[in-house]
Image (cartoon, rainbow, N blue to C red):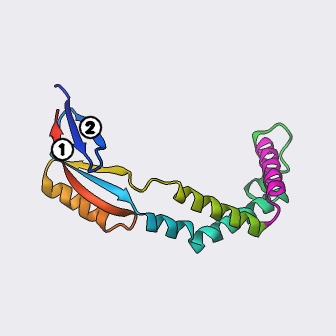
Amino acid sequence: MPKTKHIATAPDGTIFKRTSQSRTYSHMVIGQRSEERAFLLAHSKRAQVRDGENWDYRQSEANGGGVYGEYANHPAGSWQHNSYERNLAMAKEFIAANPDRQAYIDGQHAERVAAVEATNFNQWFDLGWASREDLAQKNASSHRNNAHWAKVLVVEAKIV
C-alpha cells in the first residue's frame, strides 16, 4: 500500500509534514510555548531548592557518602569500587568548581533564565494530527488547558 503524504502550514509559513500508510489526516494541532510559563518555571522556588539539594548530595559524595558509599570496602578492580572511585573524583571536582552552595544555586538560576531568554517563543510545534476536525478540536482543547502553551491552533492538513 502506498504511503500518503500530508502537509499543514502554520500562520508563519512553517510547513509540517507527515506520511501514513493507512490513515488520512484532515487537521493538525499546532502550538506556541508560553514565555510567561517558562519564566515562572525558571524563577521557581522548587527549582532553587532542587539545586541546593543537588549541591548537598555532591558535597556528601565528596566526603565519601552518597549512593556509592557502601561500595567503599569492595576490592580494588571490582566494578563497584571503580564506580565509587569515579563518583568520588567527580564529586570532589564538582565541589572544587562550586565551593559555595548559594553561588551554585544562583548560577543555576541564571542559566535557566538565560535559556528562557534565548528561546524563540514564536516557533510553532506539532501537537498532533487528526483524521477529523472534532478530534483535532478535542486535542487542541486539552493543550489549551495546559499553561505550557500560549497559543494553540487547529490548521487544515492537505494530501500531497
Residue nearest the observer in this picture, 29 or 80: 29
| Farthest top residue in view | 2
Which image quarter: residue 107? Answer: bottom right
Kindly state the secondary structure of the residue where label 2 is placed. strand
Amino acid bearing label 2: Arg
Pinpoint residue 58: horizontal percent, then vertical percent: 76, 59
* Residue 85 lies within the magenta run: yes
* Quarter location, residue 14: top left
Front-lying residue, 12 or 63? 12
| Residue in front for this viewpoint, 5 or 91 | 5
- Does 14 appear above or below 102? above
Placement of 151 over or under 86, stated as above or below: below
Q: Picture coordinates of residue 121 (x, y %)?
A: 42, 56
Q: Do the residues labelled 2 and 1 touch (CB within 8 Å)?
A: yes
- Indicate which label's residue lies in the foreground, 2 or 1: 1
- Residue 97 locus on image (x, y percent): 81, 54
Q: Give the range drawn in magenta.
A: 80-100
| Mark 2 residue crowding within 10 angstroms, few (<14) / some (14–19) / many (20+) | some
Main SS class of the magenta portion in the image = helix
Q: For the point 49% across and 54% down, which residue is it?
A: 119
Relative to 24, is 79 on the left or the right?
right
Q: What residue is at 35 percent from the left and 50 percent from the top?
A: 125
Q: Which of 67 and 104 is in front in this view?
A: 104
Image location of residue 8, percent across then percent down: 23, 43
SS assignment at label 1: strand
Q: Mark 2 points at which residue?
A: 18
Q: State the residue position of label 1.
A: 157
Work out whether mark 2 precedes mark 1 in sequence or the reverse, and give the earlier one.
2
At 59% from the left and 67% from the top, the residue drawn is 47
